[in-house]
């Protein structure tokens, strides 16, 4: 008789490690939206942030702890009393909470970052775990850069952390350096040589610098890890983290091999992926495993023939399993509100009545401009309605004029929340540049444009285009995005979203891009 499958906890760090990726900052309302989506997805732990990094981070962690029910809410802290107390206070309102403390252990970090001897590392780790246990029963400890730490010393640190009261021990491949066989040997070594290791849950946290984050995480599961730390779409520092959707579907699709289960509602994977992509303005690559546009697309004739006969010929997962509908061409300008609501739900989105009314009106307006409407069009409308940055400025009108061999011009009409209406005209090298300059002049905020991208988010010659804008202002990075069939309009709205984010930050809504020197000094797992 086969053994009952073990439960692998899914620890999501999209709001902490994921948000640390350049350009992926989130406002507090955006973090709450993602946290609620993660709770609906069924993750076991949400790492809501790094409370000591900034006041804004502390407030975001507190908001998630107060308002999101279901998962354990975790906060990251270095092994010092101030970090730990800040984390504990931010998490105080969560019914289930965890303080996650970390300390680098590798020789490289000991010498060049911490300037600490092995004895100091052991003492600091023990003190950090004990401080955390005084304030929270659930304590996780991570020896940062574990995969490059000498095995004997790593075992000493892990054993000391367990004796001090850690209930979860996480083994991070902080720089994506290890390979599967080597990583499996590391876990086997710890399980053999660390006294008391059977009392804790072993966790794994892998980065993707060599493209092996998912493979290394799955190998760790085989070797005894029963928690996987990951992010939606694999976002994170440098090349990113282990991708939640990939590791979850690997465990589900190859259940007979791994003999473990998760609590993830896999039909929520696709909509959650698209939500995070929209909020962070990080497009999902077309060939991304599990949730990419091409994941279930078949162009080769022999593949199409096989799939028509039976999906399993070329599909090891069903699109419905991850929340992706097989339907593509849908609805039109004569479609009713009921049909529209059903389609929104089929795509995995739940809207309040007021939100549905707003999106339906935008849908009807779009249907008047487009010949064909696709699922992607509705996704874009829903995500734009959910994700638009709230700020004082709104775009009332935009006119542009451009001819070959001459400067383009743009006239914008903006409305401020205080009732002012401002018009301004500017010239630029093309209509988009002119629109940006007109918005700068009208709002009085000048920025340095660092990156500008446009991509089609739907199909057809009249596809909607998404504009992504990244700017620098006062040595901080801001980003904005918008979707429209009119690329110039989309670009202008994305740029105005940037202006609104800047004004939000000035009013106190600080994001990851705006953290101070303390956050920069703190490394990541």
Image (tube, rainbow, N blue to C red):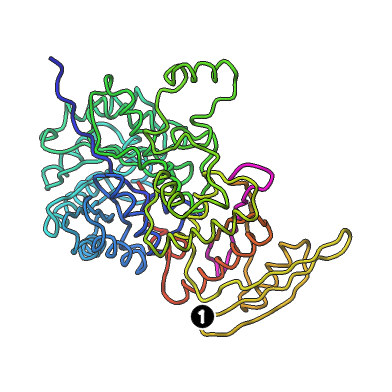
Does residue 313 lie above or below 89 as drawn? above
Position above or below: 197 against 298: below
Instruction: Report the label total.
Output: 1
436 is higher (above) or lower (below) than 156: below
The image shows residue 348 at horizontal and vertical percentages of: 39, 46
Is residue 472 a member of the stretch shown in magenta?
A: yes
Image quarter for residue 300? Answer: top right
Q: Position of residue 137 (x, y in %)?
A: 12, 53
- Residue located 40% across and 28% down the image: 318
Q: Nearer the viewer, residue 123 or 57?
A: 57
Residue nearer the viewer, 39 or 510: 39
Apparent side of residue 454 relative to residue 303 in the rendered image (left or right): right
Q: Quick one: quadrant of the N terminus? A: top left
Residue at point 41%, 48% (across, down): 342
Q: Position of residue 52 (x, y in %)?
A: 31, 63
Q: Secondary structure at mark 1?
A: loop
Q: Residues within 10 Å of mark 1 (few under 14, many from 20)?
A: few
Question: Which residue is at 55% across, 40% downward?
Answer: 329
As rendered, which of 211 and 181 lies closer to the eye? 211
The residue sitting at 55% across, 75% down in the picture is 393
Query: In this rendering, would 198 be left or right of 37?
Result: left
User: Left or right of 306: which side holds 342?
Assistant: left
Q: Position of residue 443 (x, y in %)?
A: 61, 77
Residue under pointer 1: 417
Magenta residues? 458-478
Q: Residue furthest right?
A: 405
């Amino acid at each position: 008789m086969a053994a009952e499958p073990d439960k692998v906890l899914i620890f999501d760090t999209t709001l902490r490690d994921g948000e640390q990726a350049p350009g992926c900052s989130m406002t507090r309302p955006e973090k709450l939206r993602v946290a609620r989506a993660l709770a609906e997805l069924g993750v076991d732990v949400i790492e809501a942030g790094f409370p000591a990094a900034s006041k804004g981070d502390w407030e975001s962690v507190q908001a998630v702890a107060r308002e999101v029910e279901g998962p354990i809410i975790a906060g990251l802290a270095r092994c010092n009393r101030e970090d730990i107390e800040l984390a504990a206070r931010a998490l105080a309102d969560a019914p289930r909470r965890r303080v996650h403390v970390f300390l680098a252990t590798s020789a490289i970090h000991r010498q060049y970052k911490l300037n600490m001897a092995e004895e100091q590392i052991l003492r600091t780790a023990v003190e950090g775990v004990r401080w955390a246990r005084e304030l929270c029963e659930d304590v996780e400890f991570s020896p940062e850069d574990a995969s490059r730490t000498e095995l004997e010393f790593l075992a000493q640190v892990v054993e000391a952390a367990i004796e001090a009261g850690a209930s979860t021990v996480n083994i991070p491949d902080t720089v994506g350096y290890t390979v599967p066989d080597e990583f499996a040997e590391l876990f086997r070594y710890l399980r053999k040589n660390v006294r008391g290791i059977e009392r804790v849950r072993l966790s794994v946290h892998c980065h993707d610098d060599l493209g092996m984050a998912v493979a290394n995480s799955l190998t760790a599961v085989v070797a005894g890890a029963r928690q996987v730390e990951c992010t939606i779409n694999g976002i994170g520092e440098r090349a990113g983290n282990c991708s939640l959707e990939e590791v979850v579907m690997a465990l589900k699709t190859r259940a007979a091999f791994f003999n473990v289960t998760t609590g993830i509602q896999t039909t929520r994977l696709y909509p959650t992926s698209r939500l995070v992509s929209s909020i962070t303005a990080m497009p999902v690559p077309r060939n991304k495993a599990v949730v990419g546009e091409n994941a279930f697309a078949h162009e080769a004739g022999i593949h199409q023939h096989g799939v028509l006969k039976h999906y399993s010929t070329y599909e090891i997962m069903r699109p419905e399993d991850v929340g992706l509908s097989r339907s593509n061409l849908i609805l039109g300008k004569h479609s009713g509100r009921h049909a529209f609501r059903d389609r929104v739900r089929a795509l995995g989105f739940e809207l309040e009545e007021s939100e549905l009314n707003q999106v339906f009106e935008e849908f009807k307006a779009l249907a008047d401009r487009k010949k064909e409407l696709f699922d992607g069009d509705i996704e874009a409308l829903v995500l734009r309605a959910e994700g638009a940055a709230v700020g004082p400025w709104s775009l009332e009108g935009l006119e542009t004029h451009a001819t070959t061999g001459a400067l383009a011009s743009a006239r914008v009409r903006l409305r401020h929340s205080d009732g002012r209406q401002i018009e301004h005209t500017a010239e630029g090298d093309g209509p988009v540049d002119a629109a940006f300059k007109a918005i700068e002049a009208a709002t009085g905020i000048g920025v340095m444009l660092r990156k500008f991208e446009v991509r089609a988010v739907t199909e057809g010659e009249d596809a909607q285009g998404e504009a992504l804008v990244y700017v620098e202002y006062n040595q901080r990075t801001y980003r904005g995005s918008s979707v429209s069939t009119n690329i110039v309009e989309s670009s202008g709205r994305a740029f105005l979203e940037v202006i609104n984010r800047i004004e939000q930050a000035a009013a106190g809504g600080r994001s990851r891009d705006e953290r101070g020197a303390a956050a920069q000094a703190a490394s990541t797992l």
